[in-house]
Image (cartoon, rainbow, N blue to C red):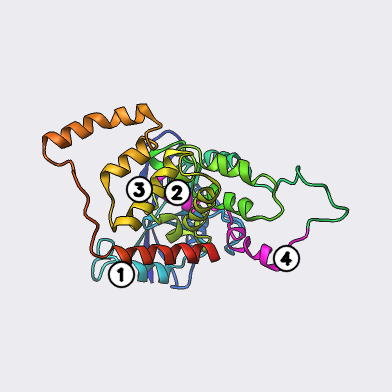
Amino acid sequence: MEVIFKIIRQQQNSAPVVQTYLIEVESGNTILDCLNRIKWEQDGTLAFRKNCRNTICGSCAMRINGRSALACKENVGSELARLQQIPALENKTNSIPEITIAPLGNMPVIKDLVVNMSSFWNNLEAVAPYVSTSARQVPEREFLQTPQERSRLDQTGNCIMCGACYSECNAREVDPNFVGPHALAKAYRMVADSRDSETENRLANYNEGTKGVWGCTRCLYCDSVCPMDVAPLEQITKIKQEILSHKQVSDTRSIRHRKVLIDLVKEGGWIDERQFGLQVVGNYFKDLRGLLSLAPLGLRMIVRGKFPLSFEPSQGTQQVRSLIESVQNDSAEC
């Protein structure tokens, strides 16, 4: 069958242009197969990365019809079938099907589908993605782990550093300080590793501002595009749980926000805004500057009659409390 490939081409520091190529393909041909044919048979100037061709190296990550994926993993048939499920991208009846290829996002383009991944690697380095055993006595042979301890590393160990999650990350797009889901997924591997001796320091680093776990917007795009089922958001959530289990309520506003929200919902079924502001922003009356920052908002609410003078728990408070406690117990067992 014939397929039109629309490739977003771009030179460094120049505007992107769309170039189309018509090729005869089989439904089982991978997107990488098609790009190779375009380069070998029609346009030798087309630039893209590739290596193993077997979903191992992660080199051929790019945006295929709007989502980041591995060109060696996706094939023409499955891609066209996916498009049929998306009305906005569905090809017109009786027309030649089209597949659009673009470079990864959140990274500057060097040429065509090749991007500069310096920020990707620098942010990975920022989380110190290697086991530290400096605080332990070096054994004669090796650090041993039980099968259970090793199994905690399996999921994150599957990451091939392709950059798909980083490309789709909304938090990274709006906050250049956020290290990215790939880095935090690797970070959890270090936190979970029984041989590591820097857990406390790591958690303090990952808890800092919006560059760490609290910068994540929980959009789930990273999980949806990961070709190896690493589930970066799940790993970020695990780090948050570790931070909360190691810290006190009053340590940081981010931690207070999470803990106070849960405690208030457990207590009354929904949030008592009066207590929420005092406990989170005012740090239980310890943060005078935080309390003063609430004053303008409080005055506007009083003037407009929107300040709650009393709090009525919801009718389903007991059910909500039971659900929260059930989730907390399950998390503790994990």
User: Of the residues shown, which amino acid type is indicated by label 2?
Assistant: Ser
x then y, percent, for residue 182: 53, 50
Distance from the alpha carbon under mark 2 to that under mark 4: 36 Å
Q: Earlier in the sequence, mark 2 or mark 3?
A: 3
For the image, the number of numbered tags is 4
Q: Is residue 170 visible?
A: no
**Separation of marks 2 and 1 at Cα, in angstroms:** 24 Å
Q: Which residue is mark 4?
A: 146
Q: Residue 121 location in percent, x, y?
A: 57, 42
Of the residues tagged 3 and 4, which is closer to the observer? 4
Q: Which residue is mark 2?
A: 167
- Residue range in magenta is 144-171
For disc 3, the marked residue is 18
Q: Is residue 112 left or right of residue 130?
A: left
**Contact flag, marks 2 and 1 (Cβ < 8 Å):** no
Q: Residue at x 62, y 44 (%)?
A: 200
Residue furthest right as drawn = 140
| Mark with earlier residue (2, 1) | 1
Q: Which mark is residue 244?
A: none
- Where is residue 67, by image quadrant? bottom left
Where disc 4 sits, the SS reads: loop
How many C-alpha atoms fall within 10 Å of the one at disc 3: few (<14), some, or many (≥20)?
few
Discs 2, 3 touching: Cβ within 8 Å: no
Crowding near pointer 1: few (<14 within 10 Å), some, many (20+)?
few
